[in-house]
Image (spheres, helix red, strand yellow):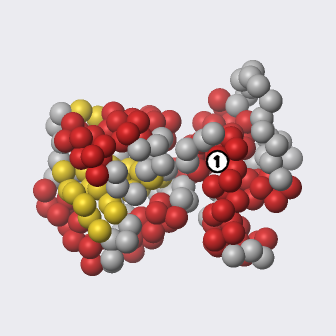
Amino acid sequence: MTRVLVVDDHPMWRDGVARDLTEAGYQVIAAVGEAKQAVRVGASLKPDVALVDLQLPDGSGVDVIHGLLAAHPTMRILVLSASAEQQNVLEAVKAGALGYLVKSAGREEFMEAVRRTTEGDAVFTAGLAGLVLGEYRRLAATPASGPAAPQLTERETEVLRLVAKGMSYKQIAERLVLSHRTVQNHVQNTLGKLQLHNRVELVRYAIEQGLDGSES
């Protein structure tokens, strides 16, 4: 059972999200409304997934993301925010959020986003994925110098190309005629080789290496 932490300062929203998750079979280990409390609880209980609002009474959701990942680097974080402002989205993703969903999303879209985040997919409200990829391409315009990258297998590179194009694990599995689990294993192996923590970092790496096809 996937263990989830909910962080939002609006009690009705927070309780509603927790209820929907519980009914869907997730284990909500805590639902809190303050940034410092969220970091303490996350560091102690180490949930698999955290759903984090950006506007909190005692701090920023971005600070919560940093704190949670410092304690548990493999935690998957989905931002749930009323804002779709470019700066908020990019700050959340750069901090390590795996996805970003605006609160106006319907229940079905919300549950699908949680499911995909749990599986390691990067999930964004329509239009925001292009914004994030565009920013990564801009950052990649000046390649960073450093040691040679670890060698990936041909299949790992093929999967990485499709990840960089924004495809879900399910879509990649169908394209390459592989099982969903095999695709996940390739991604996890690649993360380990590159010493990256999540799919967002992996997409940025792929774009920096020109694997997203943006130059074709």
Question: The N terminus appears in which quarter of the rendering?
Answer: bottom left
Q: Residues within 10 Å of mark 1 (few under 14, many from 20)?
A: some
Residue 27 sits in which quadrant?
Answer: bottom left
Q: Is residue 106 left or right of residue 162?
A: left
Residue found farthest to the front? 44
Query: Is residue 55 at all visible to an observer of this figure?
Result: no
Q: Is residue 37 left or right of residue 160?
A: left
Closer to the camera in the image, 97 or 185: 185
Residue found farthest to the left? 11
Q: Is residue 153 left or right of residue 28?
A: right
Q: Residue at x 70, y 59 (%)?
A: 186
Image vertical order of residue 121 relative to residue 34, above or below = below
Secondary structure at numbered mark 1: helix
Residue 177 sits in which quadrant?
Answer: bottom right
Closer to the camera in the image, 17 or 44: 44
Q: Residue at x 41, y 36 (%)?
A: 70
Q: Position of residue 173 (x, y in %)?
A: 70, 72
Q: Residue at x 35, y 36 (%)?
A: 67
Residue found farthest to the top? 145
Q: Position of residue 54 (x, y in %)?
A: 31, 42
Name the kind of residue labelled 1 in the image. Answer: Leu
Image vertical order of residue 68 relative to residue 29, above or below = above
Q: Position of residue 202 (x, y in %)?
A: 64, 45
Q: Residue at x 25, y 50 (%)?
A: 7
Q: Is residue 93 left or right of residue 207?
A: left
Q: Position of residue 188 (x, y in %)?
A: 63, 55
Query: Is residue 121 at all visible to an observer of this figure?
Result: yes
Which residue is the site of mark 1? 191
